Image (spheres, rainbow, N blue to C red):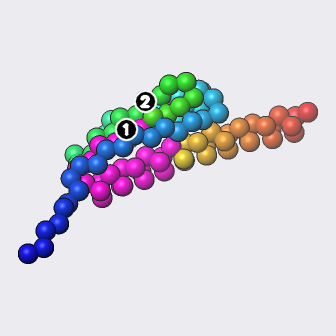
Amino acid sequence: MVSSSILVGVESELEIEFENPNEVDIILGSIKPEINGSPSDRTSVNITAYSSTLRIHIEAEDNASFRASLNSYLRWIKLSSEIINLKKETTSRALNEIQ
């Protein structure tokens, strides 16, 4: 008989640091609907902001749900950050054209 150990429950916390605290507030606000309306009951996600850092705490029942949640939140955070950077570039170009 072969015995195998199955991983049950996965938990992790990570921090992402941004250039300024305003970006963290904007990003947290943009992904808040995703935090409050998580469709999975296999994962629990808590995201907090302090200063210029975003802290993500994920608890999941299994590897697959953990990985799916982590990938989703990282993708949403990355998208929000890219939109902020695009707005900065667009505003900078517009100001240069005026001068």
User: Position of 22 compared to 28: left or right?
Assistant: right
Q: Residue furthest right?
A: 99
- Residue matched to label 2: 48
* Residue under the image location 42 percent in, 53 percent down: 71
The first of marks 1 and 2 along the sequence is 2
Say if residue 3 shows up in the picture.
yes
What residue span does the magenta drawing correspond to?
56-77
Q: Main secondary structure of the magenta part?
A: helix
Q: Is residue 74 magenta?
A: yes
Q: Nearer the viewer, residue 4 or 48?
A: 4
* Residue under the image location 23 percent in, 49 percent down: 9
* Residue under the image location 50 percent in, 43 percent down: 77
* Residue under the image location 86 percent in, 37 percent down: 96
Q: Residue furthest top?
A: 51
Percent coordinates x, y for residue 35 in the rendering: 36, 38
Identify residue type, mark 1: His
| Residues at marks 1 and 2 touching, judged by CB atoms closer than 8 Å | yes
- Residue matched to label 1: 57
Classed neighbour count for the residue bearing mark 2: other residues with Cα under 10 Å, few (<14), some (14–19), many (≥20): few
Identify residue type, mark 2: Thr
Q: Determine whether 67 is above or below 4 in the image.
A: above
Q: Quadrant of residue 87?
A: top right
Say if residue 38 shows up in the picture.
no
Q: Quadrant of residue 92?
A: top right
